[in-house]
Image: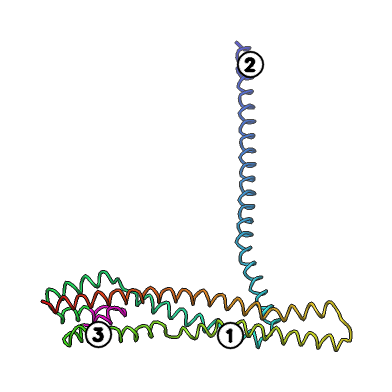
Amino acid sequence: MMKRVLVFMAFAALLLIGTAQTSKAQTDQTATNQQTTEQTQAATTQQLDTQAAAPAQGEAVLHKEIKRLFIEGGAGFMGVILLCLIFGLAIAIERIIYLNLATTNTDKLLAKVNKALNEEGIDAAKEICRNTRGPVASIFYQGFDRAHEGVEMAEKSVISYGGVQMGLLEKNLSWISLFIAIAPMLGFLGTVIGMIQAFDAIEQAGTVSATIVAGGIKVALITTVFGLIVAIILQVFYNYLLSKIDGISNQMEDSSITLIDMLAKYNQK
């Protein structure tokens, strides 16, 4: 009996020791996993912070580099070229907004005008044109306004007012063209003046130094590069505006022909 009790107590002691060792191992493993997780999170956070800081740092470096080149190129010429870019973009944006507002769904307008003309008469068609935005509706209104004088007078009115609308569409485009031409010219002028200054520095030094020549030429060419960049940017906007004007002009011509046909059929009734 005593042997069984001792065996039982020894077996229980072994179980308790094993359980304690298992718990300790699990605790150590949990602590190790938690430490590893914290290290991983810290490394991930640091990496994300580094990635987030990299673009901001790159933007700051780019901004400083542009500022340095602007100062080296000469504030006088670079400032005038920058003004050409600012004024050119301002006019281009204003023209883009105007042309987008001037764009009309001509098929829908023609259907509404034709229906109103056949069902209610010229006054109803004029009212629709008065309440519709865009040069096409304005041309239609002028045609209907002179319709009582005959189809020929209505056609002349449409042609004349179409020329007025084309002038409004092309307004201020000449200024953009001027800035496109003058920006690289100012850049070339700055380059020539910079080259003269470089040769003056060589003359004063009394010797031809690669450092003086390279530095003077680099500074002189900065204005040319900046002027060409400004001209390229404005040229893209200028061509886009021309394409928009051509599209609206084609709509005006096609719609005017359809309008004259509608008036001719209406007068034959």
Spatial CA distance of label 2 from label 1 is: 108 Å
Q: Which residues are magenta?
A: 129-143
Element at label 1: helix
Return the residue found at the far right: 206
**Magenta-colored segment: predominant secondary structure:** helix
**Mark 3 sits on what residue?**
142
Q: Position of residue 189 (x, y in %)?
A: 67, 86
Amino acid type at mark 1: Ile
Answer few, some or many: residues within 10 Å of disc 2's Cα (few below 14, many 20 plus, some between 14 and 19): few
Look at the image and say whether residue 231 sits in the magenta stretch: no
Say whether residue 169 is left or right of residue 89.
left
Q: Position of residue 261 (x, y in %)?
A: 21, 75
**Mark 1 sits on what residue?**
182
Comparing marks 2 and 1, which lies closer to the viewer?
1
Residue appearing at x 61%, y 64% in the figure: 55
Element at label 2: helix
Query: Which label's residue is closer to the chain start, 2 or 3?
Result: 2
Nearer to me, 3 or 202:
202
Look at the image and say whether residue 134 sits in the magenta stretch: yes
Residue appearing at x 61%, y 52% in the figure: 44
Element at label 3: helix
